[in-house]
Image: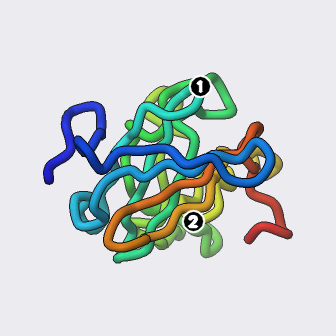
Amino acid sequence: MAADAAGRCGSHEGRRVSQGNDEEHTLCPAEEIPVNGVRVFPLGRHGIGVFNIEGRFYALSNRCPHAGAPVCHGTITGTTRYRGGYDMDWVREGEILQCPWHAWQFEIATGRSLTRPAWAVKTYPVWVENGYLVVRLTSSGRPATEESV
């Protein structure tokens, strides 16, 4: 069953309340998010972007911590690594999300900012259950930290 423009999947869209204030949402069939693609779902205050990076799924808040931009509408890209002098290497292709407003870069897997490492996009647990993507939203989300990576 195809999802509509808002990311809903007809009768398969749903919400289950779990422990405490956590909510689990069934999103859509996992196969509907193409490899190296993203779909933004209207969940939470700003929406949640679910990324399929080489078959692994990651869920990030659709809000850039820098200026509040809809970060999940940015570009999936790589980044540069300094080698010394004037030399740079292009690395991590497909692992980095670049914000559409000010080009801040974030690791998709962790939410960590490459631009300002102390900042992060909130991340949420996401998994495949019976072929469908399920995301767990907490009352505050969880910024990526050393403990959660």
Determine crowd level at label 1: few under 14, some 14-19, many 20+ residues with C-alpha closer than 10 A: few
Quarter-of-image position of residue 37 = bottom left
Where residue 40 sits in the image (x, y, percent)? 38, 40
Residue 117 visible (yes or no): yes
Quadrant of the rendering where the C terminus is positioned = bottom right
Which secondary structure, mark 1?
A: loop
Instruction: Tell me the colour scheme of the image.
Output: rainbow
> Compared to 50, does 102 lie above or below?
above
Q: Nearer the viewer, mark 2 or mark 1?
A: 1
Q: Is residue 52 left or right of residue 15?
A: left
Camera-side residue of 14 and 110: 14
Image coordinates for residue 63, horizontal then vertical, percent: 58, 32
Q: Earlier in the sequence, mark 2 or mark 1?
A: 1
Q: Residue 9's x, y, as percent?
A: 25, 45
Badge 2 element? loop
Relative to 50, residue 140 above or below: above
Q: Which mark is residue 12?
A: none
Q: Residue at x 14, y 49 (%)?
A: 2
Nearer to me, 119 or 139: 139
Q: Which residue is mark 2?
A: 109
**Residue 79 visible in the snapshot:** no
Please give the residue where the numbered disc 1 appears in the rendered image: 45
Dot 2: few (<14), some (14–19), or many (≥20) neighbours within 10 Å? some
Q: CA distance from mark 2 to mark 1?
A: 21 Å
Q: Which quadrant holds residue 5? A: top left
Q: Which amino acid, by three-letter code, is at mark 1?
A: Arg
Whether residue 59 sits left or right of residue 137 in the image: it is: left
What residue is rendered at 57% in x and 65% in y? 109
Q: Amino acid at mark 2?
A: Ala
Q: Residue at x 76, y 53 (%)?
A: 19
**Image coordinates for residue 123, horizontal then vertical, percent:** 64, 52
Farthest residue to the left: give it.
Answer: 1
